[in-house]
Amino acid sequence: MSDSPAAASTLTRVPIIDGWFTDDVHAPHLIGSKCPLCGTFVFPPRSGDCPSPFCDSTTLEPTPISRRGKIWSYTENRYTPPPPYVPTEPFEPYALAAVELEAEGLVVLGKVATGVLAADLKVGMEMQLELDVSHRDAEHEYVVYVWAPAAPSTTTTLEGGAA
Ligand SMILES: [Zn+2]
């Protein structure tokens, strides 16, 4: 974390999973699929039949979906996951959040931004999509989407009872 050379300009940015999100540093968003007949959304994006049991559509179209949502559930990972996860040395615990996108009616699981752990999260908290670098090799910088606490949309401060 502290000793990565700042050679970002020479590395090619590559999404760690192709086609799940846009590589827009300022306002990345997820890419899902949408049924053109009934409007049902799907994430991760895929083609094929509409998942709605009430719909006969056999096509789904790629579509941008929300980059903001509310925490539905969350957890914290304290052990190194198996490959293809590329571990950091030493392993740093990280949080995972399932974020509900209201407009689409989807729950999207994702890693939480570095440095934000379960103790910092709560159900219902507003989150927004950001991009982070998962790992690097000699030529590439592998980009992953993460959920980060959203900037408050009002100026009201609601911080009571801080320890
Ligand atoms: Zn449909």
Image (cartoon, rainbow, N blue to C red):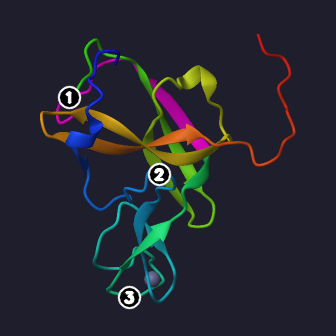
- Along the polypeptide, which appears first: circle 2 or circle 1? 1
Label 3 belongs to which residue? 57
- Distance, label 3 to label 1, CA atoms, is 37 Å
Magenta stretch: give its range: 71-85
- Amino acid carrying label 1: it is Pro
State yes or no: residue 81 in magenta: yes
The residue depicted at 34 percent of the width and 19 percent of the height is 1
| Contact? badges 3 and 2 (CB < 8 Å) | no
Q: What residue is shown at x 50% (from left), y 38% (from top)?
A: 97
Element assignment for label 1: loop
Q: Which of 3 and 29 is in front in this view?
A: 3
Task: Identify which amino acid the numbered label 2 is placed on.
Answer: Val
Residues under labels 3 and 2: Cα distance?
A: 23 Å
Q: Three-letter amino acid code at disc 3?
A: Ser
| Residue that badge 1 annotates | 82
Q: In which quarter of the image is residue 57?
A: bottom left
65 over 120 or under it: above or below: below
